[in-house]
Image: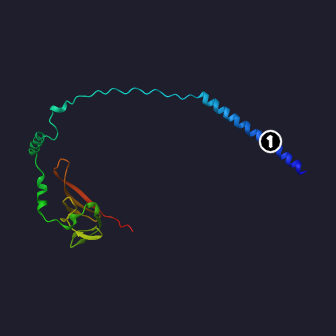
Amino acid sequence: MRSLRFLWLGVAAVSLSGCFGSEQEDLQRWMAEQRAQVRPTVPPITEPKKFTPQAYTEGAVIEPFNMQKLTQALRRDSSQPSTSGLIAPELTRRKEALEAFPLDSMAMVGSLNRNGQPVALVSVDKLLYQVRVGNYLGLNYGRITRISETELALREIVQDAAGEWIERVATLQLQERTK
């Protein structure tokens, strides 16, 4: 009985091995056919465009950083009213403590009334300062013009792209405390 079982197992193993071999051969034959049918096509590379150098014709024009052009611009600007008077008084006065910090490092944390005058509480570097209308803040000669319960308005004097001094309005909003 045991020998009969071994015989059946041997026959089954031989028949199964025959099945596996034919699938492999079929697969390899199919792959060879596919490779023979498919031919890659590579389009030819187009020739590069010919470079034609252009002559520089702007040599006769006044260059932008020439002293003559600068002189013309200064003459044109001198006919317009100057705003340099905005900055002159600011340069001669003594700076206040809060002018050493940029506005974006400051936070308005509260406001109150002292003797009928509004006072704002400004936090800078974990210190609390009381400021009033007329005090100076920030790096741009900012002078406080108005204090309300929710914001502090100030007038700054800054240089525009042309180097002229202009006035700009800036505000500090009341900041909610985060824990």
Q: In the picture provided, is 61 more to the left or to the right than 20?
A: left
Q: Please state the horizontal and vertical placement of residue 109, each as a whole percent of the image.
A: 30, 67
Q: Quadrant of residue 60?
A: top left
Which class describes the residues within 10 Å of circle 1: few (<14), some (14-19), or many (20+)? few
Residue situated in front as seen by the camera: 176 or 74? 74
Residue situated in front as seen by the camera: 36 or 72? 36
Question: Residue visible at 72% across and 37% down?
Answer: 23
Classify 73 as above or below 137. above
From the image, which quarter does the C terminus lie in? bottom left
Classify 100 as above or below 48. below
Q: In the picture provided, is 77 more to the left or to the right than 144?
A: left
Q: Which amino acid is tagged 1?
A: Val
Residue situated in front as seen by the camera: 9 or 140? 9
The figure's colour scheme reads: rainbow
Q: Please state the horizontal and vertical placement of residue 110, each as a whole percent of the image.
A: 29, 68
Q: Please state the horizontal and vertical placement of residue 138, each as a whole percent of the image.
A: 22, 61
Question: Residue visible at 11% across and 49% down?
Answer: 82
Q: Quadrant of residue 129?
A: bottom left
Q: Please state the horizontal and vertical placement of residue 111, each as a whole percent of the image.
A: 27, 68
**Residue identified by numbered label 1:** 14
Q: In the picture provided, is 173 more to the left or to the right than 43?
A: left
Classify 53 as above or below 16. above
Question: Residue visible at 31% across and 28% down?
Answer: 51
